Amino acid sequence: MSAVQFEVPAIVPADPQANVADLLVERVKATPSLALFAVPEGDGWRDITAAEFEREVIALAKGFAAAGIEPGEKVGFIARTTYHWTLVDFALFYAGAVMVPVYETSSAAQVSWILSDSGATWVIGESEEHAARIAEIRSDVPLIRQAWTMAAGDLDTLTAAGTDITDDEIVRRRSIAVGADIATLIYTSGSTGRPKGCVLTHSNFVELCRNSAVALNEVLTVPNSSTLLFITTAHIFARFISILDIHAGVKTGHQPDTKQLLPALGSFKPTFLLAVPRVFEKVYNSAEQKAEAGGKGKIFRAAAHTAIEHSRLLQEGKKISLGTKIKFAVFDRLVYSKLRDAMGGRVQYAVSGSAPLGPRLGHFFHSLGVTILEGYGLTETTAPATVNLATKSKIGSVGPVLPGVGVRLAEDGEVEVRGVNVFKEYWRNPEATAEAFDGDWFRTGDVGAFDEEGFLTITGRKKEIIVTAGGKNVAPAALEDPIRANPIVGQVVVVGDQKPFISALVTLDPEMLPAWLANNGLDRGMSLTDAAANPKVREEIQRAIDIANKKVSRAESIRKFAILDTEWTEASGHLTPKMSIKRSVIMTDFADAVEDLYSVPVSTTNIPLGG
Protein backbone atom coordinates (compact mmCIF):
# COMPACT_ATOMS: atom_id res chain seq x y z
CA MET A 1 0.00 0.00 0.00
CA SER A 2 1.47 3.37 -0.99
CA ALA A 3 1.64 6.11 1.65
CA VAL A 4 -1.00 8.80 1.58
CA GLN A 5 0.66 12.17 1.04
CA PHE A 6 -0.37 15.83 0.91
CA GLU A 7 2.15 18.57 0.16
CA VAL A 8 1.52 22.27 -0.38
CA PRO A 9 4.19 24.43 -2.03
CA ALA A 10 5.37 27.51 -0.16
CA ILE A 11 3.39 30.65 -1.02
CA VAL A 12 6.21 33.02 -0.07
CA PRO A 13 9.52 32.58 -1.95
CA ALA A 14 12.30 31.35 0.35
CA ASP A 15 14.95 33.81 1.49
CA PRO A 16 18.00 31.78 2.62
CA GLN A 17 19.75 34.92 3.92
CA ALA A 18 16.93 36.01 6.26
CA ASN A 19 17.03 35.49 10.03
CA VAL A 20 14.50 36.01 12.85
CA ALA A 21 15.83 39.52 13.67
CA ASP A 22 14.84 40.58 10.14
CA LEU A 23 11.16 40.00 11.00
CA LEU A 24 11.30 42.74 13.65
CA VAL A 25 13.37 45.06 11.44
CA GLU A 26 10.74 44.71 8.68
CA ARG A 27 7.85 45.24 11.13
CA VAL A 28 9.39 48.48 12.52
CA LYS A 29 10.03 49.73 8.99
CA ALA A 30 6.43 49.01 7.95
CA THR A 31 4.52 50.19 11.05
CA PRO A 32 6.78 51.86 13.65
CA SER A 33 3.87 53.26 15.68
CA LEU A 34 1.74 50.10 15.69
CA ALA A 35 1.11 48.72 19.20
CA LEU A 36 2.97 45.42 19.13
CA PHE A 37 2.69 44.62 22.85
CA ALA A 38 0.65 45.66 25.86
CA VAL A 39 1.81 45.32 29.45
CA PRO A 40 -0.36 45.39 32.60
CA GLU A 41 -0.60 48.83 34.19
CA GLY A 42 -3.04 49.59 37.00
CA ASP A 43 -6.37 48.04 36.03
CA GLY A 44 -5.59 48.20 32.32
CA TRP A 45 -2.84 47.77 29.77
CA ARG A 46 -0.14 50.09 28.38
CA ASP A 47 0.73 49.74 24.71
CA ILE A 48 4.31 49.38 23.47
CA THR A 49 4.83 50.26 19.81
CA ALA A 50 7.01 48.34 17.36
CA ALA A 51 9.62 51.14 17.42
CA GLU A 52 9.63 51.28 21.25
CA PHE A 53 10.03 47.51 21.45
CA GLU A 54 12.98 47.56 19.05
CA ARG A 55 14.63 50.36 21.02
CA GLU A 56 14.39 48.23 24.19
CA VAL A 57 15.65 45.18 22.29
CA ILE A 58 18.71 47.06 20.95
CA ALA A 59 19.52 48.55 24.39
CA LEU A 60 19.43 45.10 26.02
CA ALA A 61 21.38 43.53 23.12
CA LYS A 62 24.10 46.16 23.75
CA GLY A 63 24.11 45.08 27.40
CA PHE A 64 24.60 41.44 26.38
CA ALA A 65 27.43 42.45 24.06
CA ALA A 66 29.11 44.56 26.76
CA ALA A 67 28.87 41.63 29.21
CA GLY A 68 30.93 39.55 26.81
CA ILE A 69 28.31 37.37 25.09
CA GLU A 70 29.70 36.52 21.64
CA PRO A 71 27.65 35.71 18.51
CA GLY A 72 26.80 32.01 18.42
CA GLU A 73 27.11 31.53 22.20
CA LYS A 74 24.25 29.82 24.00
CA VAL A 75 22.29 31.49 26.78
CA GLY A 76 20.00 29.50 29.09
CA PHE A 77 16.74 31.30 29.98
CA ILE A 78 14.23 30.38 32.71
CA ALA A 79 11.17 32.64 33.04
CA ARG A 80 7.38 32.77 32.98
CA THR A 81 5.32 34.04 30.04
CA THR A 82 5.68 37.82 30.23
CA TYR A 83 6.59 40.72 27.93
CA HIS A 84 10.19 40.39 29.16
CA TRP A 85 10.39 36.84 27.79
CA THR A 86 10.07 38.07 24.20
CA LEU A 87 12.21 41.14 24.95
CA VAL A 88 15.08 38.84 26.05
CA ASP A 89 14.40 36.53 23.07
CA PHE A 90 14.83 39.31 20.50
CA ALA A 91 17.70 41.00 22.39
CA LEU A 92 19.58 37.69 22.12
CA PHE A 93 18.75 37.46 18.39
CA TYR A 94 20.04 41.03 17.94
CA ALA A 95 23.19 40.19 19.93
CA GLY A 96 23.74 37.19 17.65
CA ALA A 97 23.34 34.70 20.51
CA VAL A 98 21.33 31.46 20.70
CA MET A 99 18.67 31.08 23.39
CA VAL A 100 18.21 27.76 25.19
CA PRO A 101 14.80 28.09 26.89
CA VAL A 102 14.18 26.11 30.08
CA TYR A 103 10.68 25.51 31.49
CA GLU A 104 10.28 27.62 34.61
CA THR A 105 8.93 24.58 36.42
CA SER A 106 11.99 22.45 35.58
CA SER A 107 13.75 20.72 38.47
CA ALA A 108 17.38 21.48 39.34
CA ALA A 109 18.42 18.17 37.71
CA GLN A 110 16.61 19.10 34.46
CA VAL A 111 18.15 22.59 34.46
CA SER A 112 21.58 21.02 34.98
CA TRP A 113 21.09 18.58 32.09
CA ILE A 114 19.87 21.23 29.62
CA LEU A 115 22.59 23.76 30.48
CA SER A 116 25.40 21.19 30.37
CA ASP A 117 24.18 19.28 27.28
CA SER A 118 23.61 22.49 25.30
CA GLY A 119 27.00 23.93 26.25
CA ALA A 120 25.36 27.16 27.47
CA THR A 121 27.89 29.71 28.76
CA TRP A 122 25.43 32.18 30.30
CA VAL A 123 22.07 31.85 32.06
CA ILE A 124 19.21 34.21 32.95
CA GLY A 125 16.55 33.39 35.55
CA GLU A 126 13.42 35.40 36.28
CA SER A 127 12.87 34.94 40.01
CA GLU A 128 14.90 34.44 43.17
CA GLU A 129 13.59 30.86 43.15
CA HIS A 130 15.11 30.33 39.70
CA ALA A 131 18.35 31.90 40.92
CA ALA A 132 18.42 29.42 43.83
CA ARG A 133 17.85 26.50 41.45
CA ILE A 134 20.70 27.71 39.23
CA ALA A 135 22.98 28.24 42.26
CA GLU A 136 22.23 24.69 43.41
CA ILE A 137 23.65 23.17 40.21
CA ARG A 138 26.31 25.80 39.48
CA SER A 139 29.20 23.39 40.25
CA ASP A 140 27.73 20.88 37.72
CA VAL A 141 27.80 23.43 34.88
CA PRO A 142 31.36 24.82 34.86
CA LEU A 143 30.89 26.39 31.40
CA ILE A 144 28.44 28.97 32.82
CA ARG A 145 30.37 32.24 33.11
CA GLN A 146 27.61 34.33 34.66
CA ALA A 147 24.02 34.00 35.92
CA TRP A 148 21.62 36.97 35.93
CA THR A 149 18.31 37.33 37.77
CA MET A 150 15.55 39.52 36.34
CA ALA A 151 13.88 40.02 39.74
CA ALA A 152 17.14 41.54 41.03
CA GLY A 153 17.03 44.21 38.31
CA ASP A 154 19.82 42.60 36.26
CA LEU A 155 18.21 43.44 32.88
CA ASP A 156 18.30 47.16 33.80
CA THR A 157 21.90 46.79 34.98
CA LEU A 158 22.86 45.09 31.72
CA THR A 159 21.10 47.79 29.66
CA ALA A 160 22.87 50.57 31.60
CA ALA A 161 26.24 48.88 31.05
CA GLY A 162 25.74 48.64 27.28
CA THR A 163 25.62 52.34 26.39
CA ASP A 164 29.16 52.33 24.92
CA ILE A 165 28.32 49.63 22.35
CA THR A 166 27.48 51.24 18.98
CA ASP A 167 24.32 50.73 16.94
CA ASP A 168 26.54 49.50 14.08
CA GLU A 169 27.90 46.70 16.29
CA ILE A 170 24.34 45.47 16.96
CA VAL A 171 23.49 45.67 13.22
CA ARG A 172 26.63 43.61 12.53
CA ARG A 173 25.72 41.01 15.16
CA ARG A 174 22.07 40.62 14.20
CA SER A 175 23.05 40.24 10.53
CA ILE A 176 25.57 37.42 11.00
CA ALA A 177 23.15 34.47 11.06
CA VAL A 178 21.67 33.17 7.79
CA GLY A 179 18.68 30.89 7.34
CA ALA A 180 20.56 27.62 7.81
CA ASP A 181 22.10 28.72 11.12
CA ILE A 182 20.79 27.67 14.55
CA ALA A 183 18.22 30.12 15.94
CA THR A 184 17.40 28.32 19.17
CA LEU A 185 17.94 25.02 20.93
CA ILE A 186 14.71 23.74 22.47
CA TYR A 187 14.64 20.63 24.59
CA THR A 188 11.67 18.32 24.13
CA SER A 189 9.47 18.11 27.19
CA GLY A 190 10.55 14.51 27.63
CA SER A 191 7.51 12.30 28.23
CA THR A 192 10.03 9.47 27.76
CA GLY A 193 13.68 9.51 28.77
CA ARG A 194 16.00 12.51 28.89
CA PRO A 195 14.95 15.61 26.94
CA LYS A 196 16.65 15.92 23.54
CA GLY A 197 17.77 19.27 22.15
CA CYS A 198 16.05 20.23 18.90
CA VAL A 199 18.14 22.46 16.63
CA LEU A 200 15.69 24.93 15.07
CA THR A 201 17.11 27.20 12.38
CA HIS A 202 16.35 30.79 11.46
CA SER A 203 14.72 29.53 8.24
CA ASN A 204 12.43 27.25 10.26
CA PHE A 205 10.95 30.34 11.94
CA VAL A 206 11.18 32.84 9.06
CA GLU A 207 9.74 30.64 6.31
CA LEU A 208 7.05 29.12 8.56
CA CYS A 209 6.01 32.58 9.85
CA ARG A 210 5.85 34.11 6.37
CA ASN A 211 3.81 31.22 4.94
CA SER A 212 1.57 30.79 8.01
CA ALA A 213 0.76 34.52 7.99
CA VAL A 214 -0.72 34.08 4.50
CA ALA A 215 -2.56 30.86 5.39
CA LEU A 216 -3.96 32.36 8.63
CA ASN A 217 -4.54 35.81 7.16
CA GLU A 218 -8.17 36.06 8.35
CA VAL A 219 -7.17 35.25 11.94
CA LEU A 220 -4.23 37.68 12.06
CA THR A 221 -5.78 40.63 10.21
CA VAL A 222 -9.01 41.07 12.19
CA PRO A 223 -9.21 44.86 12.89
CA ASN A 224 -6.99 45.66 15.93
CA SER A 225 -5.99 42.00 16.12
CA SER A 226 -4.53 40.93 19.44
CA THR A 227 -3.85 37.85 21.51
CA LEU A 228 -3.24 37.16 25.18
CA LEU A 229 -0.53 34.54 25.70
CA PHE A 230 -0.73 32.45 28.85
CA ILE A 231 0.82 29.12 27.86
CA THR A 232 4.56 28.99 28.40
CA THR A 233 6.72 30.75 25.80
CA ALA A 234 9.47 28.22 26.59
CA HIS A 235 7.32 25.80 24.58
CA ILE A 236 7.53 26.00 20.79
CA PHE A 237 3.76 26.56 20.39
CA ALA A 238 3.67 29.96 22.16
CA ARG A 239 7.21 30.88 21.02
CA PHE A 240 6.23 30.46 17.37
CA ILE A 241 3.05 32.51 17.83
CA SER A 242 4.95 35.31 19.61
CA ILE A 243 7.36 35.56 16.64
CA LEU A 244 4.49 35.23 14.13
CA ASP A 245 2.67 38.10 15.90
CA ILE A 246 5.70 40.38 15.40
CA HIS A 247 5.88 39.45 11.72
CA ALA A 248 2.11 39.90 11.23
CA GLY A 249 1.69 43.01 13.42
CA VAL A 250 -0.57 41.45 16.05
CA LYS A 251 -0.64 43.02 19.52
CA THR A 252 0.44 40.54 22.23
CA GLY A 253 -0.33 40.64 25.94
CA HIS A 254 0.78 38.11 28.56
CA GLN A 255 -0.76 36.54 31.66
CA PRO A 256 1.46 33.87 33.24
CA ASP A 257 -0.97 33.17 36.11
CA THR A 258 -3.84 31.12 34.68
CA LYS A 259 -5.89 31.79 37.85
CA GLN A 260 -5.98 35.44 36.69
CA LEU A 261 -6.86 34.46 33.11
CA LEU A 262 -10.55 35.44 33.10
CA PRO A 263 -10.01 38.97 34.53
CA ALA A 264 -7.10 39.44 32.09
CA LEU A 265 -9.26 38.34 29.13
CA GLY A 266 -11.96 40.74 30.29
CA SER A 267 -9.64 43.75 30.32
CA PHE A 268 -7.35 42.87 27.39
CA LYS A 269 -10.17 41.76 25.02
CA PRO A 270 -8.15 39.64 22.55
CA THR A 271 -9.38 38.76 19.04
CA PHE A 272 -7.81 35.31 19.08
CA LEU A 273 -6.49 32.90 21.68
CA LEU A 274 -3.84 30.23 21.80
CA ALA A 275 -4.68 27.40 24.16
CA VAL A 276 -4.51 23.71 24.91
CA PRO A 277 -7.73 21.65 25.14
CA ARG A 278 -7.62 21.59 28.95
CA VAL A 279 -8.28 25.37 28.95
CA PHE A 280 -11.44 24.99 26.86
CA GLU A 281 -12.57 22.11 29.06
CA LYS A 282 -12.09 24.28 32.17
CA VAL A 283 -14.06 27.20 30.66
CA TYR A 284 -16.93 24.85 29.79
CA ASN A 285 -16.88 22.89 33.08
CA SER A 286 -16.66 26.05 35.22
CA ALA A 287 -19.64 27.55 33.40
CA GLU A 288 -21.62 24.32 33.84
CA GLN A 289 -20.90 24.05 37.58
CA LYS A 290 -21.66 27.75 38.08
CA ALA A 291 -25.03 27.30 36.34
CA GLU A 292 -25.68 24.19 38.45
CA ALA A 293 -24.93 26.10 41.67
CA GLY A 294 -27.37 28.84 40.60
CA GLY A 295 -30.12 26.32 39.91
CA LYS A 296 -29.75 26.76 36.14
CA GLY A 297 -27.90 23.53 35.34
CA LYS A 298 -30.79 22.22 33.25
CA ILE A 299 -30.85 25.41 31.14
CA PHE A 300 -27.08 25.26 30.61
CA ARG A 301 -27.16 21.62 29.47
CA ALA A 302 -30.03 22.34 27.09
CA ALA A 303 -28.11 25.35 25.74
CA ALA A 304 -24.97 23.23 25.28
CA HIS A 305 -26.95 20.49 23.50
CA THR A 306 -28.52 23.06 21.16
CA ALA A 307 -25.14 24.72 20.51
CA ILE A 308 -23.50 21.42 19.55
CA GLU A 309 -26.44 20.33 17.39
CA HIS A 310 -26.59 23.73 15.63
CA SER A 311 -22.88 23.68 14.81
CA ARG A 312 -23.00 20.05 13.59
CA LEU A 313 -25.85 20.82 11.20
CA LEU A 314 -23.97 23.86 9.90
CA GLN A 315 -20.78 21.85 9.32
CA GLU A 316 -22.68 19.08 7.54
CA GLY A 317 -24.55 21.63 5.40
CA LYS A 318 -27.93 20.35 6.64
CA LYS A 319 -31.13 22.37 7.05
CA ILE A 320 -31.67 23.85 10.52
CA SER A 321 -35.29 23.62 11.65
CA LEU A 322 -37.20 26.71 12.78
CA GLY A 323 -37.49 25.22 16.28
CA THR A 324 -33.70 24.83 16.59
CA LYS A 325 -33.21 28.37 15.23
CA ILE A 326 -35.56 29.81 17.87
CA LYS A 327 -33.96 27.80 20.69
CA PHE A 328 -30.51 28.88 19.49
CA ALA A 329 -31.52 32.57 19.49
CA VAL A 330 -32.96 32.30 23.03
CA PHE A 331 -29.88 30.50 24.39
CA ASP A 332 -27.61 32.96 22.63
CA ARG A 333 -29.12 35.73 24.74
CA LEU A 334 -29.29 33.72 27.98
CA VAL A 335 -26.06 31.68 27.90
CA TYR A 336 -23.71 32.09 24.93
CA SER A 337 -23.42 35.89 25.13
CA LYS A 338 -22.35 35.67 28.81
CA LEU A 339 -19.56 33.20 27.96
CA ARG A 340 -18.43 35.43 25.07
CA ASP A 341 -18.27 38.39 27.47
CA ALA A 342 -16.26 36.31 29.97
CA MET A 343 -13.61 35.82 27.26
CA GLY A 344 -13.45 39.56 26.60
CA GLY A 345 -16.22 39.80 24.01
CA ARG A 346 -13.94 40.04 20.95
CA VAL A 347 -12.54 36.51 20.56
CA GLN A 348 -13.32 35.21 17.07
CA TYR A 349 -10.74 32.46 16.76
CA ALA A 350 -8.79 30.16 19.04
CA VAL A 351 -5.86 28.06 17.93
CA SER A 352 -5.69 24.80 19.86
CA GLY A 353 -2.84 22.33 19.95
CA SER A 354 -0.84 19.77 21.96
CA ALA A 355 -3.74 17.27 22.36
CA PRO A 356 -7.04 16.46 20.63
CA LEU A 357 -9.87 18.84 21.56
CA GLY A 358 -12.80 16.57 20.77
CA PRO A 359 -15.77 17.47 18.53
CA ARG A 360 -18.15 18.25 21.43
CA LEU A 361 -16.14 21.26 22.64
CA GLY A 362 -15.26 22.31 19.11
CA HIS A 363 -18.95 22.52 18.18
CA PHE A 364 -19.92 24.18 21.47
CA PHE A 365 -17.42 27.05 21.10
CA HIS A 366 -18.22 27.37 17.40
CA SER A 367 -21.80 28.20 18.35
CA LEU A 368 -20.49 30.83 20.77
CA GLY A 369 -18.95 32.55 17.75
CA VAL A 370 -15.45 31.28 18.52
CA THR A 371 -13.99 29.14 15.75
CA ILE A 372 -11.44 26.79 17.31
CA LEU A 373 -8.77 26.01 14.76
CA GLU A 374 -7.07 22.81 15.86
CA GLY A 375 -3.54 22.33 14.63
CA TYR A 376 -0.85 19.71 14.85
CA GLY A 377 2.90 19.86 15.28
CA LEU A 378 5.86 19.12 17.52
CA THR A 379 8.95 20.92 18.74
CA GLU A 380 10.73 19.21 15.83
CA THR A 381 8.34 20.90 13.34
CA THR A 382 8.67 24.40 14.86
CA ALA A 383 5.06 23.93 16.05
CA PRO A 384 2.45 23.73 13.27
CA ALA A 385 2.61 21.29 10.36
CA THR A 386 -1.16 21.32 9.80
CA VAL A 387 -3.84 23.72 11.01
CA ASN A 388 -7.50 24.33 10.29
CA LEU A 389 -8.04 27.58 8.39
CA ALA A 390 -10.61 30.32 8.98
CA THR A 391 -11.84 29.76 5.41
CA LYS A 392 -12.06 25.98 5.73
CA SER A 393 -12.05 24.04 8.95
CA LYS A 394 -13.40 20.70 10.11
CA ILE A 395 -14.09 20.15 13.79
CA GLY A 396 -12.43 16.94 14.94
CA SER A 397 -9.52 17.25 12.51
CA VAL A 398 -6.17 19.07 12.86
CA GLY A 399 -6.59 20.62 9.44
CA PRO A 400 -4.75 20.58 6.11
CA VAL A 401 -0.98 20.96 5.71
CA LEU A 402 0.45 24.47 5.81
CA PRO A 403 2.13 26.02 2.74
CA GLY A 404 5.75 24.87 2.49
CA VAL A 405 4.97 21.63 4.34
CA GLY A 406 4.41 18.03 3.30
CA VAL A 407 2.77 15.30 5.38
CA ARG A 408 2.56 11.63 4.48
CA LEU A 409 1.38 8.48 6.23
CA ALA A 410 3.70 5.50 6.44
CA GLU A 411 2.23 2.03 5.88
CA ASP A 412 1.54 1.64 9.60
CA GLY A 413 -0.24 5.03 9.67
CA GLU A 414 2.66 6.95 11.25
CA VAL A 415 2.59 10.66 10.38
CA GLU A 416 5.78 11.89 8.68
CA VAL A 417 6.58 15.54 7.94
CA ARG A 418 9.01 17.42 5.70
CA GLY A 419 9.27 21.06 4.71
CA VAL A 420 10.29 24.55 5.81
CA ASN A 421 9.38 23.82 9.44
CA VAL A 422 11.30 20.60 10.07
CA PHE A 423 14.23 20.93 12.47
CA LYS A 424 17.84 20.37 11.46
CA GLU A 425 18.87 17.68 13.95
CA TYR A 426 18.96 16.61 17.59
CA TRP A 427 21.83 18.43 19.30
CA ARG A 428 24.94 16.25 19.63
CA ASN A 429 22.85 13.12 19.07
CA PRO A 430 23.43 11.74 15.53
CA GLU A 431 21.93 8.34 16.46
CA ALA A 432 18.61 9.86 17.53
CA THR A 433 18.63 12.11 14.43
CA ALA A 434 19.22 9.16 12.08
CA GLU A 435 16.45 7.18 13.78
CA ALA A 436 14.00 10.10 13.48
CA PHE A 437 14.29 10.51 9.71
CA ASP A 438 13.41 8.50 6.62
CA GLY A 439 15.33 10.53 4.02
CA ASP A 440 14.06 14.09 4.54
CA TRP A 441 10.83 12.91 6.19
CA PHE A 442 10.67 13.30 9.97
CA ARG A 443 8.95 10.41 11.76
CA THR A 444 6.64 11.98 14.34
CA GLY A 445 5.68 8.85 16.29
CA ASP A 446 2.02 9.85 15.93
CA VAL A 447 -0.56 7.81 14.06
CA GLY A 448 -3.10 9.55 11.85
CA ALA A 449 -5.45 9.44 8.87
CA PHE A 450 -6.37 11.83 6.06
CA ASP A 451 -9.81 12.44 4.62
CA GLU A 452 -10.25 12.89 0.87
CA GLU A 453 -9.72 16.68 1.16
CA GLY A 454 -6.40 16.34 2.95
CA PHE A 455 -7.62 17.10 6.49
CA LEU A 456 -5.51 15.18 8.98
CA THR A 457 -6.84 13.46 12.11
CA ILE A 458 -4.45 12.22 14.81
CA THR A 459 -5.58 8.93 16.28
CA GLY A 460 -2.83 8.25 18.83
CA ARG A 461 0.86 7.77 19.60
CA LYS A 462 2.52 4.82 17.87
CA LYS A 463 4.32 3.77 21.07
CA GLU A 464 1.16 4.10 23.15
CA ILE A 465 -0.99 1.61 21.24
CA ILE A 466 -2.11 -1.05 23.74
CA VAL A 467 -2.27 -4.66 22.58
CA THR A 468 -4.51 -6.74 24.87
CA ALA A 469 -3.87 -10.40 25.65
CA GLY A 470 -6.57 -11.14 23.08
CA GLY A 471 -4.55 -9.32 20.40
CA LYS A 472 -6.85 -6.28 20.18
CA ASN A 473 -5.08 -2.98 19.30
CA VAL A 474 -6.43 -0.09 21.41
CA ALA A 475 -5.54 3.62 21.02
CA PRO A 476 -5.75 5.05 24.58
CA ALA A 477 -6.52 8.62 23.43
CA ALA A 478 -9.89 7.56 21.94
CA LEU A 479 -11.03 6.58 25.46
CA GLU A 480 -9.05 9.08 27.55
CA ASP A 481 -10.14 12.30 25.79
CA PRO A 482 -13.92 11.88 26.36
CA ILE A 483 -13.35 10.81 30.00
CA ARG A 484 -11.11 13.83 30.66
CA ALA A 485 -13.94 16.08 29.49
CA ASN A 486 -15.86 15.27 32.70
CA PRO A 487 -15.60 18.19 35.15
CA ILE A 488 -14.29 16.16 38.10
CA VAL A 489 -11.69 14.19 36.13
CA GLY A 490 -8.17 15.55 36.45
CA GLN A 491 -6.32 13.01 34.33
CA VAL A 492 -6.88 9.49 33.08
CA VAL A 493 -4.56 6.76 31.82
CA VAL A 494 -5.94 3.72 30.04
CA VAL A 495 -4.03 0.49 30.72
CA GLY A 496 -4.26 -3.11 29.55
CA ASP A 497 -1.17 -3.99 27.53
CA GLN A 498 -0.94 -7.81 27.42
CA LYS A 499 -3.86 -7.94 29.88
CA PRO A 500 -7.23 -9.70 29.38
CA PHE A 501 -9.21 -6.42 29.24
CA ILE A 502 -8.85 -2.62 29.30
CA SER A 503 -8.84 -0.67 32.60
CA ALA A 504 -8.20 2.91 33.64
CA LEU A 505 -6.47 4.90 36.37
CA VAL A 506 -8.31 8.15 37.12
CA THR A 507 -7.32 11.21 39.17
CA LEU A 508 -9.76 13.89 40.36
CA ASP A 509 -9.55 17.61 39.50
CA PRO A 510 -9.11 19.45 42.84
CA GLU A 511 -10.16 22.78 41.25
CA MET A 512 -13.51 21.53 39.92
CA LEU A 513 -14.27 18.97 42.65
CA PRO A 514 -15.54 21.33 45.45
CA ALA A 515 -18.21 22.94 43.22
CA TRP A 516 -19.34 19.54 41.91
CA LEU A 517 -19.53 18.10 45.45
CA ALA A 518 -21.62 21.07 46.66
CA ASN A 519 -23.93 20.77 43.63
CA ASN A 520 -24.43 17.10 44.43
CA GLY A 521 -25.29 17.55 48.09
CA LEU A 522 -21.87 16.53 49.40
CA ASP A 523 -19.32 18.29 51.58
CA ARG A 524 -17.39 20.68 49.31
CA GLY A 525 -14.35 20.42 51.60
CA MET A 526 -14.09 16.64 51.18
CA SER A 527 -10.47 15.43 50.83
CA LEU A 528 -9.23 13.74 47.64
CA THR A 529 -8.87 10.49 49.59
CA ASP A 530 -12.50 10.55 50.80
CA ALA A 531 -13.78 11.70 47.40
CA ALA A 532 -11.93 8.87 45.64
CA ALA A 533 -13.88 6.35 47.76
CA ASN A 534 -17.23 8.19 47.69
CA PRO A 535 -20.03 6.20 45.96
CA LYS A 536 -21.49 9.30 44.23
CA VAL A 537 -18.06 10.28 42.88
CA ARG A 538 -17.52 6.70 41.67
CA GLU A 539 -20.92 6.81 39.95
CA GLU A 540 -19.93 10.03 38.17
CA ILE A 541 -16.64 8.50 36.97
CA GLN A 542 -18.53 5.40 35.83
CA ARG A 543 -20.87 7.68 33.86
CA ALA A 544 -17.89 9.31 32.14
CA ILE A 545 -16.45 5.89 31.32
CA ASP A 546 -19.80 4.66 29.97
CA ILE A 547 -19.89 7.65 27.59
CA ALA A 548 -16.37 6.84 26.36
CA ASN A 549 -17.17 3.13 26.01
CA LYS A 550 -20.03 3.92 23.63
CA LYS A 551 -17.44 5.20 21.14
CA VAL A 552 -15.51 1.91 20.92
CA SER A 553 -16.12 -1.81 20.47
CA ARG A 554 -16.73 -4.04 23.50
CA ALA A 555 -13.21 -5.51 23.22
CA GLU A 556 -11.79 -1.97 23.50
CA SER A 557 -14.07 -0.80 26.31
CA ILE A 558 -12.94 -0.07 29.86
CA ARG A 559 -14.11 -2.82 32.24
CA LYS A 560 -12.57 -1.59 35.51
CA PHE A 561 -11.16 1.60 36.93
CA ALA A 562 -9.40 2.88 40.02
CA ILE A 563 -9.73 6.44 41.35
CA LEU A 564 -6.41 7.50 42.83
CA ASP A 565 -6.31 9.79 45.89
CA THR A 566 -3.44 11.79 44.43
CA GLU A 567 -2.85 14.40 41.71
CA TRP A 568 -0.71 14.04 38.60
CA THR A 569 1.03 17.33 38.02
CA GLU A 570 4.14 18.67 36.40
CA ALA A 571 5.62 19.08 39.89
CA SER A 572 4.92 15.42 40.73
CA GLY A 573 6.77 14.42 37.56
CA HIS A 574 3.71 12.87 35.89
CA LEU A 575 2.88 15.62 33.36
CA THR A 576 5.05 17.44 30.84
CA PRO A 577 5.04 21.28 30.82
CA LYS A 578 2.38 21.21 28.10
CA MET A 579 0.21 19.01 30.36
CA SER A 580 0.68 15.76 28.42
CA ILE A 581 0.77 12.64 30.57
CA LYS A 582 4.11 10.88 31.06
CA ARG A 583 2.64 7.42 30.51
CA SER A 584 5.82 5.44 31.23
CA VAL A 585 6.44 7.29 34.52
CA ILE A 586 2.83 6.74 35.63
CA MET A 587 3.00 3.05 34.72
CA THR A 588 6.14 2.69 36.87
CA ASP A 589 4.94 4.79 39.84
CA PHE A 590 1.45 3.24 39.93
CA ALA A 591 2.36 -0.34 38.97
CA ASP A 592 0.70 -1.63 42.17
CA ALA A 593 -2.58 0.15 41.38
CA VAL A 594 -2.54 -1.38 37.87
CA GLU A 595 -1.79 -4.83 39.30
CA ASP A 596 -4.72 -4.50 41.74
CA LEU A 597 -7.08 -3.90 38.82
CA TYR A 598 -6.20 -7.31 37.39
CA SER A 599 -5.72 -9.31 40.61
CA VAL A 600 -9.46 -9.41 41.41
CA PRO A 601 -11.82 -11.01 38.88
CA VAL A 602 -14.14 -8.50 37.21
CA SER A 603 -17.29 -10.15 38.54
CA THR A 604 -16.35 -9.57 42.18
CA THR A 605 -16.01 -5.79 41.94
CA ASN A 606 -18.78 -3.32 42.65
CA ILE A 607 -18.10 -1.56 39.36
CA PRO A 608 -20.61 -2.21 36.57
CA LEU A 609 -19.11 -3.23 33.25
CA GLY A 610 -18.89 -0.44 30.70
CA GLY A 611 -19.84 -0.81 27.05
Image (cartoon, rainbow, N blue to C red):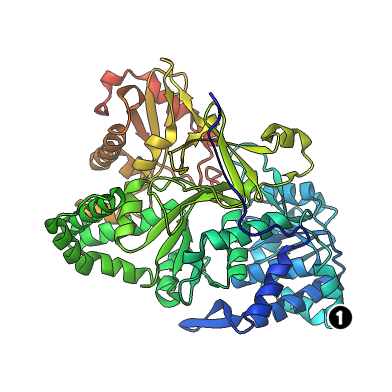
Q: Is residue 376 found left or right of 167 in the rendered image?
A: left
Q: Residue 120, percent across and down? A: 80, 55
Q: In the image, what residue occupies the spot 53% across and 31% down?
A: 462
Asked if 426 appears above or below 249 in the picture, the reply is: above
Asked if 550 appears above or below 84 in the picture, the reply is: above
**Which residue sits furthest top?**
470
Q: Residue 68, percent across and down? A: 87, 68
Q: Quadrant of residue 337?
A: bottom left
**Amino acid type of the residue that numbered disc 1 sits on in the rendered structure:** Thr
Q: Quadrant of residue 58?
A: bottom right
For residue 526, say whether it is visible: no
How many numbered callouts? Answer: 1
Q: Does dot 1 land on a helix, a strand or a loop? A: loop
Q: Is residue 222 found left or right of 365 in the rendered image?
A: right
Residue for badge 1: 166
Q: Residue 106, percent across and down? A: 63, 52
Q: Residue 93, percent across and down? A: 75, 66
Dot 1 crowding, Cα within 10 Å, few <14, some 14–19, many 20+: few
Q: In the image, what residue occupies the spot 56% across and 44% down?
A: 573
Asked if 353 appears above or below 418 in the picture, the reply is: below
Quadrant containing the C terminus is top left
